[in-house]
Image (cartoon, rainbow, N blue to C red):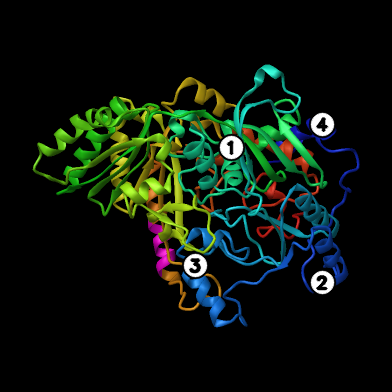
């Protein structure tokens, strides 16, 4: 990292001139941030001034499970943990309750429930002046705990959720001929909000996440994969413009012509490191006629049968599914099952069935496999995120946010509800290069998959690797801050496990630490076995190990040096900190003390 620091010196001045005015942030920032009970912590009058400045939107936070909370409050929270919308609407909760030996969800001391960029700017300036730990939360889905920290001031953007389509958007200072269909999305909006406006009502497509309750801003800043990213590129690749509050408290526009370095960093450089995004403008795409899915499960009678099944599937994937139409995942379960959870776009049901027919015929012809008839279905793409459609045609596939006054657009895939507040035991991932699909490399890939599955269940997410995507999607993704290895990966392999919610003080919540650590060891052994086929392949920042080794290279590869330069330019005082975020090497693990 010392070499990278030296490389950044030459560019820092130029970048600062383009983003921050001279003298915006004082030099020689304190090595330690202020905490409650210390002389540096703001007094009651100063907190009241911030409350007044933000229109009364400064909140004192406490977990619903904290000591002294009423039984009614605790019971409401216990019931609400089954609903990710409830969790997202509670400023003291996060969608993940912690990670064994890594972090535990803790409420901030105060939060600004921002309604606009001015509220965010006020909170950022207050945190900078008083040297506070600052945290940003939209959807609250960060596995690494980036959206929470005790003794901090939270910028909570949940209420900034407006979504507005534009027929011909021209970014600030960009040429008029760059006009294109787009959508403005507030920092607190979730993908359910975006899909409802753009697809269900607008008849177009915006590249976003597969989980409807994930925040738009966080996903884009992390790079962002969704079910159909193999066809349209990452969510970050569709970013046209962002409104962002930088560390000096200024509200800035970032696009290809205005603050271009900051704009590039926001496209996959990781949320919470460069500023607080308050609004995004994303490119929209023509909507395919159909979206669809293929579900099924094949059970092998022996290890040899499983290996033969995987070998057949890998070759089938290379020949028939390695293209823009197919996304989502297959998984190896219980050391003997291949579970299919695939989606497709741009094909009708007959075309999808024809695609899979040779593989299914091969399985049926062999007595060593038990195989129920798979489900293959296609629906008009406009209804893929339409809760009314699913209530009528596929009840139970999605679940509504049933709280009084909830948005009629707010539904989630029912299976996602099982992860509400989950506590992670271990989470590992690695990209798998497309070179492994070559006939002469398939054997090594299959051997590695079988070895990994002997330790823990393995998932292959084909939409989280861009190899096989159209040239336009690859070019747009190449112009983001993500690790370029994503362009050469045909899938992201994930090996992970966890338990139920375990928020501090939660009634009945216990973590069997020995069991959790044992699971983490087995998960680690699984990824080690898989990496024999693809060592040092890199991985996706938003879905990776909290203890990721050489994380700078794994997450961003050759792009990290430039990201570090942008960080020094827009946040020289280190106000914005997240675990394993750009520039976090300069701070202690909890972001409170600057390293010597």
In whole angstroms, how far apart are the C-alphas of marks 2 and 4? 37 Å
Q: Residue at x 44, y 31 (%)?
A: 230
Instruction: Give residue 91's position: percent from left, percent from top.
Output: 63, 63
Q: Earlier in the sequence, mark 2 or mark 4?
A: 4
Magenta extent: 515-522
Q: What residue did someone put label 3 on?
A: 80
Mark 2, other Cα within 10 Å: few <14 / some 14–19 / many ≥20:
few
> In the image, is 449 to the left or to the right of 231?
left
Q: What residue did someone put label 1 on?
A: 556
* Image vertical order of residue 186 relative to residue 312, above or below: below
Taking depth in this image into account, of 337 and 88 the one nearest to the observer is 88
In whole angstroms, how far apart are the C-alphas of marks 2 and 3? 35 Å
Which numbered disc, 3 or 4, marks the residue closer to the eye?
3
Q: Earlier in the sequence, mark 1 or mark 3?
A: 3
Mark 3, other Cα within 10 Å: few <14 / some 14–19 / many ≥20:
some
Disc 2 + disc 3, Cβ < 8 Å: no
Q: Secondary structure at mark 2?
A: loop
In whole angstroms, how far apart are the C-alphas of marks 3 and 4? 46 Å
On the rendered image, what quadrant is the C terminus found in? Answer: bottom right
Q: Earlier in the sequence, mark 1 or mark 4?
A: 4
Q: Is residue 19 visible?
A: yes
Magenta: main secondary structure: helix
In whole angstroms, how far apart are the C-alphas of marks 1 and 4? 23 Å
> In the image, is 313 to the left or to the right of 217?
left
Q: What residue did someone put label 4 on?
A: 18
Q: Earlier in the sequence, mark 1 or mark 2?
A: 2
Instruction: Give residue 301's position: percent from left, percent from top.
Output: 14, 49
User: For residue 571: magenta?
Assistant: no
Q: What residue did someone put label 2 on?
A: 38
Q: Earlier in the sequence, mark 2 or mark 3?
A: 2
Instruction: Give residue 58's position: percent from left, percent from top.
Output: 75, 63
């Amino acid at each position: 990292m010392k070499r990278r620091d030296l490389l950044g010196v030459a560019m820092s001045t130029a970048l600062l001139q383009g983003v921050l005015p001279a003298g915006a942030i004082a030099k020689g920032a304190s090595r330690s941030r202020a905490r409650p009970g210390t002389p540096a912590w703001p007094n009651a009058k100063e907190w009241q001034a911030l409350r007044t400045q933000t229109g009364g939107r400064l909140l004192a936070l406490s977990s619903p499970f904290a000591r002294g909370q009423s039984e009614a409050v605790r019971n409401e929270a216990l019931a609400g943990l089954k609903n990710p919308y409830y969790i997202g609407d509670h400023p003291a909760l996060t969608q993940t309750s912690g990670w064994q030996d890594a972090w535990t969800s803790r409420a901030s001391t105060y939060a600004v429930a921002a309604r606009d960029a001015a509220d965010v700017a006020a909170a950022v300036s207050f945190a900078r002046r008083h040297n506070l730990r600052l945290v940003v939360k939209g959807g609250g889905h960060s596995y690494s705990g980036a959206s929470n920290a005790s003794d901090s001031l939270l910028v909570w953007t949940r209420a900034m959720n407006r979504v507005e389509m534009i027929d011909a958007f021209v970014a600030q200072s960009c040429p008029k001929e760059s006009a294109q269909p787009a959508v403005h999305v507030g920092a607190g909006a979730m993908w359910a909000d975006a899909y409802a406006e753009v697809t269900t009502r607008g008849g177009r497509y915006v590249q976003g996440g597969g989980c409807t309750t994930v925040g738009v801003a966080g996903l884009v800043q992390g790079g962002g994969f969704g079910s159909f990213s193999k066809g349209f590129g990452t969510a970050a690749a569709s970013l046209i413009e962002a409104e962002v509050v930088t560390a000096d408290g200024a509200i800035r526009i970032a696009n290809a012509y205005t603050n271009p370095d900051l704009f590039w960093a926001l496209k996959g450089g990781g949320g919470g490191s460069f500023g607080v995004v308050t609004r995004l403008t994303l490119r929209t795409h023509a909507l395919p006629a159909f979206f669809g899915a293929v579900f099924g499960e094949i059970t092998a009678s022996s290890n040899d049968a499983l290996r033969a099944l995987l070998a057949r599937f890998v070759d089938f994937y290379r020949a028939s599914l390695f293209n823009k139409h197919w996304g989502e995942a297959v998984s190896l379960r219980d050391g003997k099952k291949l579970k299919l959870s695939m989606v497709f776009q741009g094909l009708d049901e007959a075309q999808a069935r024809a695609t899979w027919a040779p593989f299914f015929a091969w399985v049926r012809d062999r007595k060593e496999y038990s195989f129920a008839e798979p489900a293959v279905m296609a629906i008009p793409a406009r209804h893929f995120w339409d809760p009314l459609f699913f209530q009528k045609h596929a009840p139970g596939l999605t679940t509504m946010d049933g709280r009084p006054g909830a948005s009629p657009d707010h539904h989630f895939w029912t299976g996602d509800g099982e992860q509400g507040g989950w506590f992670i035991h271990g989470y590992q991932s690695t990209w798998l290069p497309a070179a492994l699909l070559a006939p002469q490399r398939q054997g090594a890939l299959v051997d590695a998959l079988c070895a990994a599955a002997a330790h823990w269940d393995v998932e292959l997410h084909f939409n989280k690797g861009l190899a096989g995507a159209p040239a336009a999607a690859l070019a747009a993704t190449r112009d983001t801050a993500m690790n370029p290895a994503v362009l050469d990966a045909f899938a992201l392999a994930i090996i992970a496990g966890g338990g139920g919610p375990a928020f501090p003080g939660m009634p009945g919540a216990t973590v069997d630490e020995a069991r959790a650590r044992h699971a983490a060891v087995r998960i680690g052994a699984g990824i080690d076995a898989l990496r024999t086929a693809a060592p040092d392949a890199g991985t996706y920042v938003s879905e990776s190990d909290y203890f990721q080794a050489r994380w700078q290279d794994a997450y961003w590869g050759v792009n990290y040096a430039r990201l570090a330069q942008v960080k020094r330019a827009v946040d020289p005082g280190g106000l914005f900190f997240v675990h394993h975020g750009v520039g976090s090497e300069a701070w202690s693990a909890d972001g409170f003390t600057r390293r010597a």
